[in-house]
Image (cartoon, rainbow, N blue to C red):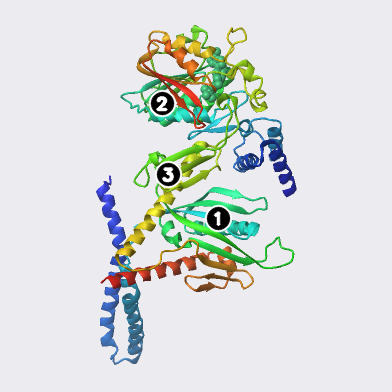
Amino acid sequence: MSSAVDITRAKQIKELEPLQDAWVSWSHARDSLQETIPLLSDEDPAMRALASEEYVSLTETLSEHVHSVFPKLLVPSSSTRHLSAMLEFKSGVGGSEASLFLADLLRVYVRHANANRWKTQVIASNETDGGGVKDAILEIKGEGSYDALRWESGVHRVQRVPATEASGRTHTSTVAIVVLPLTEETDNFSSGDDIFSMDDVKIEVMRARGAGGQHVNKTESAVRLTHVPTGITVSMQDERSQHQNKRRAFQVLRARLMDIKLTKEMEDRRATRRNLVRGADRSEKIRTYNYAQDRVTDHRLGLSLMNLTSLLEGDGLQDFIDALKRSHDEDLMEEIVEGL
Amino acid sequence: MFDHMARLLASLCTHLGREQAKQEFKWMKQALDKGLIYAPTDLSTMVQRRLRGEPLQYILGTTPFGPLDLLTRPPILIPRPETEDWALRLANGFFPSPTRPLSVLDLCTGSGCIPLLLCHLWPPGTTRAIGVDISPSAIQLAIDNAVRCNIATYDEVPRTLPQTNTFTPLLGDIRDSAFLGSLKPPFDIVTANPPYIPKREYVELPTSVKDFEDPVALIGDPPEAAQQDGLSFYHCIAQLLSIKGMLKESAFVALEVGQGQAESVESILREVAAFREIDIWRDPWEKKRVVVARC
Ligand SMILES: C[S@@+](CC[C@H](N)C(=O)[O-])C[C@H]1O[C@@H](n2cnc3c(N)ncnc32)[C@H](O)[C@@H]1O
């Protein structure tokens, strides 16, 4: 039987593993180096050659520890590392072409999630007649998915000749993505918690139903929630079940409020450090997909990937996500150093 | 292929309006794709049926009811979202435990939706429910739904079985006192969504209700009744509730009513001496929908 204490301890041990590993490999390299030094002046020339090769590789390992492995351990572990993600997609400028691009992006994130063994579900989607999607909500369940995807928030731009365009002119259209933190679902979804109080939420069903009850058997399952203090509204209508739509709407509401809470906490931290790093602006253009040049550019990183298909059909997205994480970790380390 | 689909959707739009048509079309496709349709069929047959006015729930063969997914079968009344709403509210208002179990009587049980929801939401071993209906096909559907929801349908649970909730559908006419013999009163909770539509409103009903659902489930008064106000069943139920030994000491009663009937049903219940407190619950569309009474 494992008690709660055991579980907490096991978690702590698990989280200390990287530190332990780094220390073990550092000590191991250092000991080997000490053993190698006398061999550099060995009588046997073959031995000397071997030793000097070994010497180069060991010093490389040690400096790698100093420059990268140990500093990385300083990055405080993220308080949101356990959270799942909810991605909201909205097509922007570009009309039906934006909707088609949204459908492409949706597939990119579903494929990326599958590659990471995260579970995906499209919980709302507003399809257009031409095979596009006007807006959608994608749930990505799995530990770490929020942390990995949070920098995908922003405006994604595509420059390409639409399939529907006879003249062959390049169009520019956009899709906005907002990545929200998704907390564990509770059984009683509509009871308030530390994020909101039930008294602040107005629940409305959509459309008139005439006499209702036995008189009507039409399916009317659309639901709208309004969080009065913030004015946030969430509408859900994709499921036949009103109960299910309500559950989903509460999930989205909770994620949006959690997002506001996290953003505020981050801003407060920055304010206390008098560090005026600008928070991520979601109306900012973060990435451009340029078909003519077969290139995807991340504007924050100034990084371009030359193979657009690898991003759309393969897992090129991982490269951006890794680079964004590195850049975030470096920022954090800088903050720590400045605070010393 | 694409054209064919577009034509099907367009014809649905002219019948249901664009938004509703898009939704229903999507649900039909989803049900087909996931293999949730029992009878062999195809999208165009489904759309044809819908165009003739058949309720979507009969075409798909199921309907959601709270967290449950219940079978629907013509002509048994399709559970309504108004009923779903108050049944959930009722479930959330009680906290039975194995040491304080509840016995429930659901009159006019139809698909069995109300007692099945209670049995599903309340902890195992806390609920013993009985449902009565005059229609043999409704009783069969209630049994099938119990199986589908993993709720035991027999009343005598062998002692060796782990504690379970039970739902027993019984065939009977609630206007005939003979059915009382098979009940085991007293009850903690009595629920009913009896037929309540007055004859003159019945003839005005939309096709999908009038031509597909059982009139016996809808029309509130027998043809020979002097009053044709849809309230006959409430008089009958009030009489049942007045029988000594029917209700436990602090029993709770919930009766669904039609538009404009709440006050009349409230005064019918006032005649039942046992009730201390009578209240009216509204549905999500703000209609007075349920008369609730407590002993
Ligand atoms: C409006 S439906 C309600 C079904 C279900 N409880 C629900 O809420 O969806 C009314 C039900 O009462 C049944 N019924 C009609 N007359 C009855 C009677 N005299 N005794 C018992 N049941 C009757 C009908 O067969 C029908 O299933």
Vertical comparison of A103 with B142: above or below:
below
Q: Are marks 1 and 2 in contact (CB under 8 Å)?
A: no
Which of pointers 3 and 1 indicates the residue nearer the eye? 3
Q: Distance between the Cα atoms at labels 2 and 3?
A: 40 Å
Please name whichever residue, B167 or B74, is drawn nearer the observer in this view of the structure.
B74
Q: Quadrant of residue B4?
A: top right
Q: Amino acid at mark 2?
A: Asn
Can you identify the residue that label 3 sits on? A228
Residue B111 visible, this orientation: no
A166 to the left or right of B181: right
* Circle 1 residues within 10 Å: few <14, some 14–19, many ≥20: many
Secondary structure state at the residue bearing disc 2: loop
The label on residue B165 is 2
A62 to the left or right of B210: left
Q: Distance between the Cα atoms at labels 1 and 2?
A: 46 Å
Residue B196 visible, this orientation: yes
The label on residue A90 is 1
Q: Quadrant of residue B161?
A: top left
Q: Quadrant of residue A23?
A: bottom left
- Quadrant of the image containing the N terminus of chain A: top left
Q: Are marks 2 and 3 on the same chain?
A: no
A260 to the left or right of B65: left
Q: Amino acid at mark 1?
A: Lys
The numbered mark, 3 or 1, whose residue comes first in the sequence reads: 1
